[in-house]
Amino acid sequence: MSVRISRLCSAGTVSWLAATLVSVCLMNAALAEPAYRKGQFLEPAYEGWRQNADGTYVFIFGYQNENWEEELKVPVGENNFFSPGLEDRGQPTHFLPRRNRFTFEVPVPADWGDKELSWTLTVNGVTKVAYATLARDYVIDNVVIASETGSLGAGTSSPESRSNQPPLVTVQGDRVGDEIVRSVRVGQPLTLQAHVADDGLPKPRAAGVGGFPAGGTPLQRMMRPPTRVTVGKTNGLFLSWNIYRGEGNATFDPPQVKPWEDTRTSANSPWGALWVPPPIPEDGMYSVNVTFDKPGTYVLWARADDGGLFHDQYVTVNVAP
């Protein structure tokens, strides 16, 4: 059987059948790999770079947490650092499960040239390093981001996707200089409000699976074979709050949409088979209550995502005993 599939995949006589067989092969390979709930390592990922209007650049990073459930905490220091120069470049110290793309940006000067910037993570005795350069094949734009996150099919675009602008999230309330700072006690709910504005693109729709069209009833969507050659994402606007830095944990009410690629059926994630976008408030205002279990200084991360593009905001929270 494997010989026949190999010959069909290489023959190229029927493109749709070939693509389907390749995706089945990839799916079977993925299923053969062990899946871990906890105890595994982190893989830093260099996603690419783009140039700012003033000639400077930003390197964009993400990561792969090899655990399906464990959220890892790695303080900035010998196990979580950049080199050369400052070891703290604004990277997370709280890592969500699985694949998290385009998580944060590191600015570098216009005269960066051919130098290399590395991000090193050591977790459970395993050290992994991502290397960032201005190599031309790593330049990214909005279409690349939408494609890599699964909003678009592999290697495709449309007038809609090319005209899409990222949503804009604005956290409400006072600021301390350029920072948004709040204070609360352990166990006491803190209410955060944020306004999200968006252009309505891309239009909400589910990702196609295995060559079959998107849409249909939840049962039909659940019964389709999970065969795809790239990650698939359901388009639709949402706002998600999560811990970015901090020693303790937090509970969010209501529960937040997962910004990471949880592909399991019924997962509260745009990459899950049965996920549908939550209702959009008429005034664009989103409210969440967050409760912390330990004192300390936390950084909360708010991501507004329309399926294709995103915008991030951060809030520092001082949690007293």
Image (cartoon, helix red, strand yellow):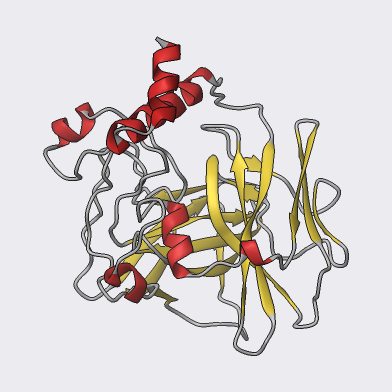
Corner quadrant of residue 16: top left
Among all residues in the image, which is located at the extreme top?
1
Residue 125, placed above or below residue 284: above
**Residue 112: percent from the left, percent from the top?**
80, 76
Say whether residue 230 is left or right of residue 204: right
Quick one: 291 or 58, which is closer to the camera?
A: 58
Residue 181, placed above or below residue 243: below
Say whether residue 83 is left or right of residue 266: right
Residue 268, placed above or below residue 107: above
Quick one: 20 or 83, which is closer to the camera?
A: 20
Say whether residue 78 is left or right of residue 144: right
- Say which residue appears at 53% left-offset and 43% top-offset: 99
Among all residues in the image, which is located at the extreme bottom?
54
**Residue 183: percent from the left, percent from the top?**
57, 67
**Residue 242: percent from the left, percent from the top?**
50, 54
Among all residues in the image, which is located at the extreme left?
217
Which quadrant is the C terminus positioned in?
bottom right
- Say which residue appears at 37% left-offset and 50% top-offset: 257
Say whether residue 155 is left or right of residue 98: left
Which quadrant is the N terminus positioned in?
top left
Residue 210 in sight in this render: no
Q: How many marks?
A: 0
Corner quadrant of residue 60: bottom right
- Say which residue appears at 81% left-offset and 45% top-offset: 79
Residue 73 in sight in this render: yes
Quick one: 175 or 142, which is closer to the camera?
A: 142
**Residue 232: percent from the left, percent from the top?**
36, 45
- Say which residue appears at 21% left-offset and 59% top-offset: 279
Quick one: 187 or 304, which is closer to the camera?
A: 304
